[in-house]
Amino acid sequence: MDLVDIPENPVPSGVVSGMIEASDGVQLRYARWRPTARKSAGTVCVFPGRSEFIEKYFEVISDLRRRGFTVAVLDWRGQGGSQRPLRNRRKGHVDTFGQFDKDLAAFMETVVLPDCPPPFFALAHSMGGNILLRNAVRAPSWFERQVLSAPMLQLTIPERRGPLVFGLAEVLCLTGFADAFVPGGGATAAGTAPFPGNPLTSDPVRYRRCNRIVEVEPALGLGSPTISWLRAAGAAMAEVMDPDFPPRVHVPTLMIAAGGDTVVSSRAIETLAFRMKTGSHIVIPGARHELLMEQDNIREQFWAAFDAFVPGSPVFG
């Protein structure tokens, strides 16, 4: 699928995009750009969250290019312009998060390492943050440092209900309901509900812009996850929150939490950061889940933290 270009969200100039194949044959969409600044600071790889797509990050891509970074972005399997596994394309489905690990490896080995300049840094949101954290225990790592925006470590469900929710998902998968939407879920594309009361951003302009992309190209939309995705997510979150996990993370990591997040647990982010030898975190008060799609004053705080953490950003000269 070609990148979708609309007046409110034009494709940044100079793009190279296409499809690559993961080790299990799944087709993945990618895009990359050279920096617009004269000084090259390396490459930032951008990894979206669940239901997101490359087009949603055009503003972020431009922000990074102005900082001197080459930028490479991936659509995870099952979303964006990448291959989707089920007949109903609006179902967000995966069997295990190990499948996303295959996507990450294919992207790095086929797109980033051959065609992008080092050093390599990662910028990941929500589900993407979980995937990057789980891969940060592997040596050697591709990344010098990683910045995780509201990483998905725990969902904002009561702690006592977690085992019940994920246990029920396991039972339903074993009884033939793995491909069904989660209870209460449906095919309506994520992030396209009316703006008032949405949990993602307090910025109506950026929210509407994302809606407009899906209106123009409905094939980019993704509905609720399946029960199988929920089971896989539960296992992936349990992995990173295991007390034995944090000391094994050897990639310097900055986690940026949203103070008003009702999607993932900011408390879990704080807990994990304190346990990590290479981790730190900040909380941006009042921000909703999608920090990079928020109002300018919130985005400015995010970029200030990014610039102070990632070598080659303006603060480093």
Image: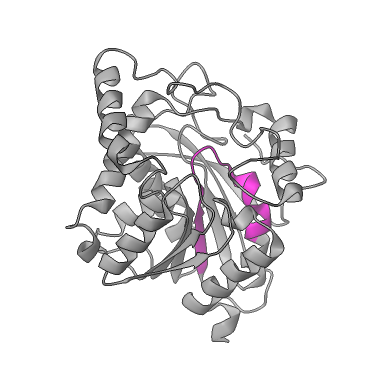
Colour scheme in use: one colour
Q: Residue at x 39, y 18 (%)?
A: 179
Q: Is 25 rendered above or below residue 69? A: above
Q: Is 110 rendered above or below residue 257? A: above
Which image quadrant: the N terminus? top right
Q: Nearer the viewer, residue 255 or 284?
A: 284
Look at the image and tell me whether residue 38 can be seen: yes
Look at the image and tell me whether residue 41 can be seen: no
Q: Is residue 263 left or right of residue 274?
A: right
Q: Residue furthest top?
A: 176
Q: Is residue 53 magenta?
A: yes
Q: Residue furthest right?
A: 7
Measured from the top left, where is residue 317 in percent x and y? 58, 87
Q: Is 158 rendered above or below residue 165? A: below
Q: Residue furthest bottom?
A: 317
Measured from the top left, where is residue 81 in percent x and y? 57, 35
Q: Quadrant of residue 252?
A: bottom left
Q: Residue at x 63, y 59 (%)?
A: 61
Q: Is residue 52 magenta?
A: yes
Q: Residue at x 38, y 57 (%)?
A: 267
Q: Nearer the viewer, residue 226 or 110?
A: 226
Measured from the top left, where is residue 166 in percent x and y? 29, 31
Q: Is residue 116 left or right of residue 202?
A: left
Measured from the top left, where is residue 16 in percent x and y? 62, 51
Q: Residue at x 57, y 65 (%)?
A: 70
Q: Is residue 19 left or right of residue 127?
A: right
Q: Which residues are magenta?
A: 43-61
- Total labels: the figure holds 0
